[in-house]
Image: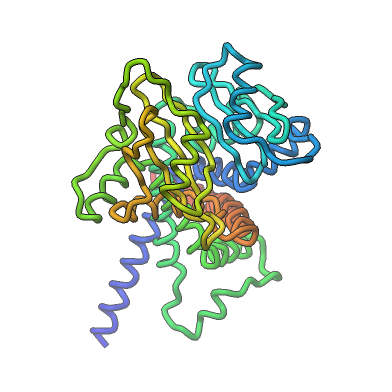
Amino acid sequence: MKQKSSSWNLAKHQRSWYSKWHTWAGITAGFVLIIVSLTGALLVFEAELDKWLYSELYDFEKTGNKLSYQEVTEKVKNDYPDLDLGGVFLRKETDVYTFFSNKKPFYQIIANPYTGNVTGKRVYKKTVMGFIRNLHRTLLIPGIGRYIVGISSLVCVVLIVTGLKLWIPDKWNKLKHKLTLKWSSNKKRFNYDFHYILGAYFSSFITIIAATGVMITFSSIVLIFMFLLNLQSPKSLKSIFNQKSEYIEGKKPLSIDSLIAIVEREIPETSVTGIRFPSDSLGTYTVNTLSPYSTETGDVSFIFVDQYSGKFIFNSHKKELQLGKLYLNWVTPFHYGTFGGLPTRITALISALATATLFITGFIIWIPRIRKRNKMKKNITY
């Protein structure tokens, strides 16, 4: 009997400890995570919403064959000679060539892939979806904002773990009761049950979204661990992306058509999804590629190519960089739910809304408790 009493006291103590962690973690990061969750829900369908909001940019006849990267680039450069173009991408979601400039205010130029005509020139951060993306990533706070979001995402993982610990029944025969919502309950009890049941059903999805959010924010640190797990000396993002071409005086850089031909010859059955142009005479071409295998995300790689010789300087397609490729292929797709097409995107959308709802219902639970505690302190004082 004494042993049972000791176990019960220990369980009660642990529950109190988890409850405090859960409460204070929610208070600390709740407001930030409500903002991040709601904006994240919109970003799941960012491309589609942007097309709907700015339909005039994407409203053109789809006749004939698409122009090549080089043909479209030459036309845009001729039409906008003053723009210092940094690169071009052909995105599946929008089916347009999208250019970006190297200098402030960092214009985004959208071009019809069939004619090369520019349909729009804008600063993406000043668009509706650009504002939402910036709010989601940085809370509109320069510098430190992205780290506040990252740390809050980490706190979200703590909240899920402690919440599950509080929710798990002490006996398995109570599990059905814990998973069932009683619609006839009073408002206070209904909110309490809804909070814990919602958390139980969506805990795995929310954990994945939060954990990948942490990885995106602290990608530099994650990349170092990737190299260590691959039994390689760690490299920083700066050392990876700061590749140089071997300058050859008097020689012109490779044409875009020649560049793509080299990439497709070296990596068969791949398609080029984007090209970053050399920033100067020592810069490299950065080529983004997508192999047509398996998942909705495909097999993403990026390659640094010498602008004069066409030599591959860095290739994430190599076998020794497979962990890095896993990061490229899965972290962002898992975060936004794009890895499995429409079903996983809808799941990510609902999970993001569920996260915001959890914090709102959590605050509703917490406010009466804090009022009761303050009232008791006031009575004791008097």
Q: Residue furthest top?
A: 82
Residue 233 x, y percent position in the rendering? 19, 46
State the image coordinates of residue 286 (x, y, percent, origin top left). 42, 35
Residue 347 visible in the shown view: yes
- Quadrant in which residue 166 is drawn: bottom left
Q: Is residue 81 above or below residue 212?
A: above
Q: Nearer the viewer, residue 374 or 97?
A: 97
Q: Is residue 26 left or right of residue 193?
A: left
Q: Position of residue 154 (x, y in %)?
A: 39, 49
Quarter of the image holding residue 303? top left
Q: Which residue is pictured at 52% across the width and 43% down the height?
A: 272
Relative placement, left or right, of 177 versus 303 is right
Q: Is residue 53 above or below residue 155?
A: above
* Front-lying residue, 70 or 28: 70
Where is residue 35? Give x, y as percent: 55, 40
The residue at the point 49 percent across, 39 percent down is 260
* Quadrant of the drawing holding the N terminus: bottom left
Q: Name above or below for residue 361 compared with residue 2.
A: above
- Residue at 61% x, 36% y is 68
